[in-house]
Image (tube, rainbow, N blue to C red):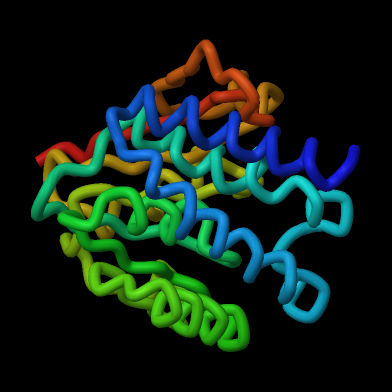
Amino acid sequence: MGFARNIERDLAALGGLLDRLGLPATLISPIRAHSRAVKEAAGRLGLVSPNDVEHVIPRHSADSLLFALVRRPAPGERWVDVGSGAGFPGLVLACAFPECSFTLVEPLEKRAGFLELTAADLGLGNLDVRATRVEELEPDLFDVAVARALTEPSEALRSMLRVVRPAGQAIVAISRDAAVITSGTIVELGDLGNVDSPGLFSMMTREG
């Protein structure tokens, strides 16, 4: 696939989702800037697989916006991205929803440093990076906890629920194979356009 076609594909993937969410097309610029930073640091920090380096936007950036279709971030809410890695989905959501605050939890210090530097370069004042694990966070801190690329969604959801307030929610992106074993509520999104994702999520709500 040529460079021009890559750009066309990326714009289509992001533009369709932003329109669906009622968000301005100007957000394409910071989201693409983040994707470029991920590509540049991918090999050094292991941010994405080698096969994904040329497909960061359709497979990761746009996929991150799908969380907002499952549960739209509201002004004043506090969200946490568990195991943020390259900033998916938390940094992308922070770009799109500046009136909501996002904490990115990434235990590897070099990756956490990448997130801090990228957030500063993008001027994101609604984002905080924690070089720690979710188990070390205080309970009841957040309205919503989100995560991608976790191998055992049911266990992940239960650990994430600890840090959300009563009636708060934990949401994990899952594969079709994981959908048959998770104990959470399955949400399947349709009409994904150019987004390279199964559009499947498992969600739990914390009881009071």
Query: At 63% from the left edge and 70% from the top edge, which residue is drawn?
Result: 37
Q: Is residue 55 left or right of residue 117?
A: right
Q: Quadrant of the N terminus?
A: top right
Residue situated in front as seen by the camera: 98 or 77: 98
Res. 114 image quadrant: bottom right
Q: Where is residue 48 drawn, in percent x and y?
A: 74, 60
Whether 63 is drawn above or below 147: the answer is: above
Residue situated in front as seen by the camera: 39 or 165: 39
Whether 169 is drawn above or below 31: the answer is: above
Give the number of callouts: 0
Whether 77 is drawn above or below 190: the answer is: below
Residue situated in front as seen by the camera: 104 or 125: 125
Q: Where is residue 188 drawn, in percent x and y?
A: 49, 17
Q: Where is residue 92 drawn, in percent x and y?
A: 44, 54
Identity of the residue furthest to the front in this view: 4
Query: At 38% from the left edge and 26% from the top edge, which residue is drawn?
Result: 19
Q: Where is residue 205 drawn, in percent x and y?
A: 25, 35
Identity of the residue furthest to the top in this view: 191
Query: At 26% from the left edge and 59% from the top edge, which residue is drawn?
Result: 163
Q: Is residue 133 left or right of residue 79?
A: right
Q: Quadrant of the C terminus?
A: top left
Query: At 31% from the left edge and 75% from the top edge, which residue is drawn?
Result: 128
Res. 199 image quadrant: top right
Whether 150 is drawn above or below 82: the answer is: above
